[in-house]
Amino acid sequence: MKPSLRHSLIFLASLAVAVAATPSPTARKWTIGMSQCNLGEPWRVQMNADLRKAAAAHPEVTVIFKDAQNDTLRQRAQIEEFINSRVDLLIVSPKEAAPLTPPIADAYKRGIPVIVLDRSVLGENYTQFIGADNRRIGRSAGEWIVRQLATHPRVKAGGKARLVELKGLMTSIPGQDRSSGFREALKGQPVEIIFEADMKWLEPEARKEMESALAVHREIDLVYAHNDPGAHGAYLAAKAAGREKSITFVGIDALPHEGLAYVRQGMLGATFEYPTGGAEAIASALQILRGEKVPKRVTLPSRVYTRENLERGGDPLK
Ligand code: FRU
């Protein structure tokens, strides 16, 4: 072998060794802090499971989960802990909008990218918001309800159908949007809201509020609850009063073992899907960590499930 060729081969071999030894950008390890507002509701357990599953496919990321147990002050403190431990990225699903805006903005201003998941905060001091369009879901629920009640005897006789609205926590944006969208759809229609209450997303609260509604109103045609636990709580209250057959119950979330099961069992007339966004959040987190640009908002799609369309997988919202 000519000396020059031998030198070239030695050079190429050492180059290959050097390239292999240099850590590639993807070999970097990242720590993501996830602040979950509570794990008392099945939907949030599902969100964490979706995050875990998506992250498991990426050994370069570790997700540290903290559960605020539905306590805003605890969630604020947990976000501060994540900031102090300098996580590479934060994912937050906040309990309430206003009180969680400052710690999220603080993380963002200190250079920690923040993905806000499902419940939004005020202003724009975060990297990305991921969630479904709650106003649109509320409006679709309202339109479905108006169509459903058009054939009700009270409406056919020229009267108005009588509705109960059991709201999600009204200091959270999904609660506000699910209510305003719903009321938009009801404008000018032969329906009236005869009872409304904030059940704070919680089944026992919804049951209690529904007991009050049943005690005061002898005729209730439909209950619109901002989530499936709320609709189920209302159903149980009506059943205990022997009145569940004359009332239609509508909820939101459509988890397979929760809302979809209730529709299948005939307890709910409809449920609207509210995707957790867990997989999308991990995909976005990786893009952000790799220095790629991401859109400010990601709007997730939703579907409606009724007894008629359940077996064929529901229908997309109109
Ligand atoms: C769970 C939950 C869901 C609801 C969502 C709104 O905490 O109440 O049932 O769809 O939060 O943020």
Image (tube, rainbow, N blue to C red):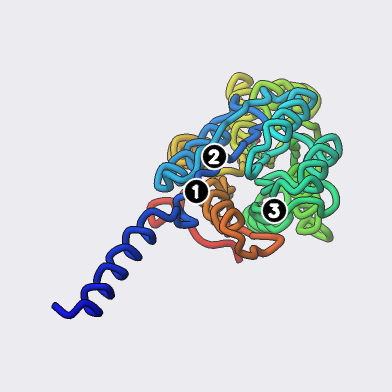
Q: Which residue is more in the foreground, 19 or 61?
A: 19
User: Mark 2, mark 1: which one is toward the viewer?
Assistant: 1
Residue at (64%, 44%) from the top-left corner?
Answer: 89
Quarter of the image where the N terminus is located: bottom left
Q: Secondary structure at mark 1?
A: loop
Which residue is found at the position 76% from the left and 51% from the top? 126
Is disc 2 in contact with disc 1, using a CB cutoff of under 8 Å?
Answer: no
Residue extending farthest to the front is: 3
Foreground residue among 25 and 206: 25
Q: Position of residue 70 (x, y in %)?
A: 70, 25
Residue 222 position by quadrant:
top right
Position above or below: 224 against 318: above
Q: Which residue is mark 1?
A: 28
Residue 122: where, in percent of width, then height? 84, 48
List the residue tagged with mark 3.
129
Question: How far apart in space, not on screen, are marks 2 and 3 (Cα)?
Answer: 15 Å
Q: How would you rate the neighbour count of disc 2 (Cα within 10 Å): few for under 14, some for 14-19, many for 20 or more? A: many
Q: Residues within 10 Å of mark 3 (few under 14, many from 20)?
A: many
Q: Mark 2 highlights which residue?
A: 47
Q: Residue furthest left?
A: 1
Q: Nearer the viewer, mark 1 or mark 3?
A: 1
Q: Which amino acid lies under the numbered mark 1 shown in the image of this protein?
A: Arg
